[in-house]
Image (cartoon, helix red, strand yellow):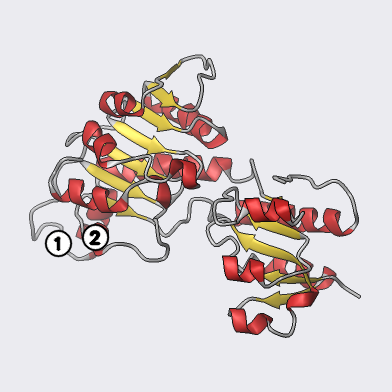
Amino acid sequence: MKPEILLIEPMMPDIERQLDAAYTVHRFTSIAQLKDIAGNIRGIATGGATGVPQDVMDSLPALEIIAINGIGTDAVNLTQAKERNIRVTTTPGVLTDDVADMAIGLILSLLRGLPAGDRYVRDGEWGRKSAPPLGRKVTGKKLGIIGMGQVGRAIAHRAQAFAMPVSYTDLRDFGLKDHTFVPDLKTLARDSEVLVVAASGGAGSRHLVSREVMEAVGPEGFLVNVARGSVVDEQALAQVLEAGKLGGAALDVFEHEPEVPAALRHSPRTVLQPHRASATVETRLAMGELVVRNLAAHFANQPLPTAVI
């Protein structure tokens, strides 16, 4: 018999076909759905932002593996997974380029006012109403990066093409050539014209970007988040934007997705995306293939390609 797995978040059609061929796949709709099948579910495929709701995890006594289609693990109870000997895998490296590309795209969109210009043309206002405000030059801006892992380094690499001096903060100094380590986050924020969040999510980084950090970036500075929404204090962000104490913010992630505060949605100082940094055909296929490989390895009692635990 095929192993039974729970698909919590939809994946690319080709990936779902592979899963259907190898497993009995139950597509998650509600906790009530699991009443008669919970004891048979041995694996979960899910997304990084969605993870595994605690009530779902608690209801699956036979669960052996959680294969995350993404790099975030903060939406999965890793402590409980370890206690229950549940393996957890992610898709590291595969989405690094796309997330870094999105960060640069958000910087350009925010500083140059690309969304406003697009609306100006689409709405037929060109030649009829005053043009949108002037943007800000990107080339040469001082870039600060919070979290210098694979994504942070990929962002820094791309920033070099824009002659942007790069400084960063992390748990330690990586001794990176051409990039300056700044141990204090507020100092990094104060010295940056654009501050990009590329840090991991989870309890340890919740609201790491506080009101004080945002105010340190200042009314002439900009914040970009391509990490996790929980890293930024969203309520404080809305307030400092409204007060003009931060120049602008570009966000691909939010604290309570898909809910986005109205103050951020309606602010003229924001550029927003629906958590789509890795949303390219090529990357989503590659991520899905890695999920398939991790599940296949587990059920074949082979080493997992990208195990977290």
* Labels 1 and 2 touching (C-beta < 8 A): yes
Residue depth check, mark 1 versus mark 2: number of the one nearer the observer: 2
Q: 239 or 219, which is in the foreground?
A: 239
Q: Which residue is mark 1?
A: 125
Which residue lies at the image location 51% right of the left edge and 22% below the top edge? 172
Q: Classify mark 2: helix, strand or loop.
A: helix
> Where is residue 180 drawn, in percent x and y?
42, 17
When the figure is inspected, residue 6 is found, relative to residue 231, above or below; the finding is: below
Horizontally, is 286 left or right of 271 in the view? right
Q: 107 or 62, which is in the foreground?
A: 62
The amino acid on which the numbered mark 2 sits, given as a three-letter code, is: Arg
Q: Which residue is mark 2?
A: 119
Residue 301 bears which disc, if any? Answer: none
Q: 119 or 7, which is in the foreground?
A: 7
**Residue found farthest to the front:** 83
What is the total number of numbered labels drawn onto the structure image?
Answer: 2
Q: Name the quadrant containing residue 2.
A: bottom right
Is residue 103 visible to the viewer in this orientation of the structure? yes
> Where is residue 134 drawn, in percent x and y?
16, 41
Q: Classify mark 1: helix, strand or loop.
A: loop
Tell me which numbered mark, 1 or 2, is placed earlier along the sequence: 2
> Where is residue 106 drawn, in percent x and y?
37, 45
Horizontally, is 160 left or right of 220 in the view? right
Q: 69 or 216, which is in the foreground?
A: 216
Q: Name the quadrant containing residue 295.
A: bottom right
Q: Name the quadrant containing residue 192.
A: top left
> Where is residue 188 drawn, in percent x and y?
33, 25
Q: What whole-number distance in Å separates the C-alpha atoms at marks 1 and 2? A: 8 Å
Image quadrant holding the N terminus, namely bottom right
